[in-house]
Image (cartoon, grey):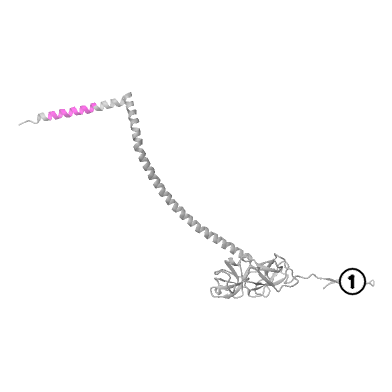
Amino acid sequence: MVSGKPSKIKLFKSTKNFNFILILLCLILVFLGKLDLIAIRNMKGFLSDFLAPITYALNKPVKEIAGVFEDVKSAGSLREENIRLKTEIRKLNVINSKTSSQELELLELRKLLKVLPERKNQIITARAITAPGGVFANTVLINAGKDYGIKIGQPAISSLGLVGYVVNVGMKTSRIILLIDINSMIPIYFTSSNWPAIVQGQSGELLKIKFLSSKARPIEGEIVETSGHGGRLPSGINVGKVVKSFSGNFYVKPSVDFLRLTYITIITNKTSLPTFSRSFQGFAPLQKPKSSISLKGLNLSGKRKIESTED
């Protein structure tokens, strides 16, 4: 029978020798690390120079691929930014169009406040829902009727002046006959010469002047306003200005552009004859008084006393 004692001794000796070798290698490596040998430095430099092109060649595709991924990522972000900016531009365009429309409406409504006569009036402002003009009549329809107190005969104005007057009223709509209609006849007076007359539509751009005194001399370019004569319309509403044709006849060109009517205001409390302002001087020019001589008898000295009187 073989004893196990010698085998244990051999195992111990081999383990001891292995540990000694490891310790010796560690000491050699520490010693070599402390040495600043020229050969080792040259070897390190050679290895760095040798591996640099290989490292650059390996890193270049990696950098290119990283750049491609970065470009794709930036292109995706730019596309999203472009879509966002286009959406913002569309929103701004909508807001801009709404703002422009509201600004025009505001200017139109502001002008409406300036066109009214000096007296306080109750007004209703409505939108024109049909285009003016027609085959047999020049009228326009607005979206207000009896529910707003509108009645037949009430005057209609815009921001520029007189549009016409109401001829038909429904519960929700009203129809207005325009100045240019051939059935429209409006009492007016010339603001410079102060002569009264009547203007009649001709289904065209100009109004015909009727019932003007033969003594009247209209002035080209003078403003024409409503006279209030007859009590149908208030006085002082702008109608247009006097123009002269090539034939020498005078007409009135309306100040309102009937093809671009948007808002129309109805004066709803016009039910009685107008009371003229103090500055209004009648429907005909004032005549200057002529002086005359009359004999009043004798004075204290026995001579006739002459005095001047006025007709």
Between 26 and 39, the one lying in front of the other is 39
Q: Residue furthest front?
A: 247
Q: Tell me where residue 37 appears, x and y as whole percent.
A: 32, 24
Q: Position of residue 67 (x, y in %)?
A: 39, 43
Secondary element under disc 1, as helix, strand or loop, is strand
- The quarter holding residue 307 reads bottom right
Residue type of the residue flagged with mark 1: Ile
Q: Is residue 302 left or right of residue 245?
A: right
In this view of the protein, can residue 67 be seen by the observer?
yes
Given residues 262 and 102, the one toward you in this image is 262
**As drawn, 81 above or below 66:** below
Residue at point 33%, 24% (across, down): 38
In which quadrant will I find the C terminus? bottom right
| Residue drawn at point x = 15 percent, y = 29 percent | 12
Q: Is residue 261 left or right of residue 62?
A: right
From the viewer's side, name the closer residue of 135 and 6. 135
Q: Residues within 10 Å of mark 1 (few under 14, many from 20)?
A: few
Residue at the far right: name it.
302
Write the residue at 59% across / 63% down. 108
User: Does the magenta-highlighted stretch encompass residue 109?
Assistant: no
The part of the image, by quadrant, that contains residue 263 is bottom right
Residue 161, image x, y percentages:
63, 67
Chief secondary structure of the magenta portion: helix
Q: Does any portion of residue 37 appear in the rendered image?
A: no
16 is within the stretch colored magenta: yes
Q: Quadrant of residue 136?
A: bottom right
Q: Label 1: which residue?
A: 306
- 8 left or right of 26? left
Question: Range of the magenta residues?
Answer: 8-24
Quadrant showing the N terminus: top left
| Side of 288 relative to 1 (left or right) | right
